[in-house]
Amino acid sequence: MPAAAPAAPRGAAPAPPAAAAGAAAAAAPPAAAGNAPSVAARAALFGTAVEQLEEVPARVVGSIPDWLKGSLIVNGGGDYTQMAHMFDGYALLSKARFEGGAAWGSQRFIDTEAYRSYRQQDILAIATGGGSFTDNASVSLHAVGPAGEGGRRPRLLAVSETPKASYLVNPDTLETLSKATFPDKVKGDLTTAHPTPLSDGRLLNFTRSLPFGGFHIFKQDPETLARAEVAFLPDRRPLTPAWLHDFPANDDYAVIIEHPLYMSLPSLLFGTPKPFVFMDWLPEDGTRITVVRLDGSEPNRVFTAPPFFVFHYSQCFEETTADGTRQLVVDMAAYDDPAILNDLMLQPLKQPSGQVSRSYYKRMAIPLTGPKGGGGELPAPSLLVSDSNDFCEFPSINPSYRGRPYRYAYVMSAVRPTNMGNALSKIDVATGETLTWYMQGGAVGEPLFVARPGASDEDDGVVLAPGGGPDGRSFVVVLDAKTWAELARAELPFATPNRFHGIFSPGA
């Protein structure tokens, strides 16, 4: 078992007795010089992965609930040879399958054109900024194909931030099936890796046409992958469009939040250096926020807000206030500026020094009532938790609460000093209370909630997250979502590099 500090609820009553070794403790861990990932952990996180094509048993420490049946499949870079940025690694899928209290692991590179060229010709085919848009589908996964028993879909769509970086994958074997094609005429050179699942099964996303273009907002059929454009929004700056990694949305609205972080087309094409990878930050512009009604029944509402930066949003739902005002509530992991982009350069990440930028779990309320077209100034997003919880990323929720009021969020967090996330937190947005599980000398990834069959409480289930210990050993941790106690770890017999986003595939 990796040498790790136990979980530590912050601002909460002591946890119940531990159900397994490494379960939640009552006191927050002290800050320590060794909080940042160890030399062995960093070597595993940013080295070159070895494929494990056949499933192999994982060593289970603790007790995995018998009801947990399915696979956590996570995307991310798998080969960082000569790479400069965390976003550059060649796409690798890592899988942990759970059944009957046991676990198995496997991993495989996605057979992209970029990776094939590199493997066959030893040519680096990708880089963050510089060159043509890549097909390296290394960011996230989404279930597609005809829905079967229990709603399970037979294929996964691995994607990144260009439409060409879209590949269909077998969730059982992780084999690449084909490059995804879209039987439609939706324009666009860029997209996001974060489509919003709608209640009817379709996916909501947008493409970007460059330059002198904008946002082509579309709904996508999960079976045919056909996209139907439902709205178009011109770019705020047609020659230097804002960069968006994600956007908040629900069944009725898409919210396009244009931070004053602008892409440089020369930097994208030729690798010209910019202050933030391939982008410029112009905080004097503030943030433009456009609310788009997806059925076209309302005019767009355009607002401005102070400058801030977001990688990931967790929630977007409509509510009516006590005075009858309709508003959209948007929750997010927010930064004051985009310095996090430079934090993710590999050279500083491979060193034990430095501090990851501060970010906080915040909320913004956007009015839906008022004069046609709305508009006006909005305040900056407000804190949902104490500002002592000063790193928050990969926010997620119980997916059955997507698009409606909820209480609990699950995030990657940090116990400083560290230059990477080394903790997992459960946030109660009603009380501001936070529970934190901590890995000294290691690193963790995105937390995903899996409900217990028959659950009625929002937090009745487990949270799964990939991680790497200070000894360089990779694992998936299983936390009780209600108590935040560690139930088990599935220790994998192979190294899993730094992971981005994943999916839980039931029954797989």
Image: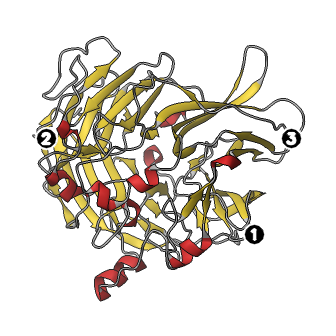
Nearer the camera: disc 3 or disc 2: 3
The Cα–Cα distance between marks 1 and 2, rounded to whole angstroms, is: 54 Å
Amino acid at pointer 3? Gly
Q: Which residue is mark 1?
A: 212
Say which element carries label 1. loop
Q: Which mark is residue 432?
A: none
Say which residue label 3 marks: 373
Image quadrant in which the N terminus is located: top left
Residue 205 image point, x, y percent = 62, 55
Label 3 residue SS = loop
Residue under numbered circle 2? 60
Residue 165, can we see it?
A: yes
State the residue in front, 186 or 350.
350
Describe the element under mark 2 as helix, strand or loop.
Answer: strand
Q: Select label 3 or label 1 by which is in front.
A: 1
Mark 3 and mark 2: Cα distance apart in space? 56 Å
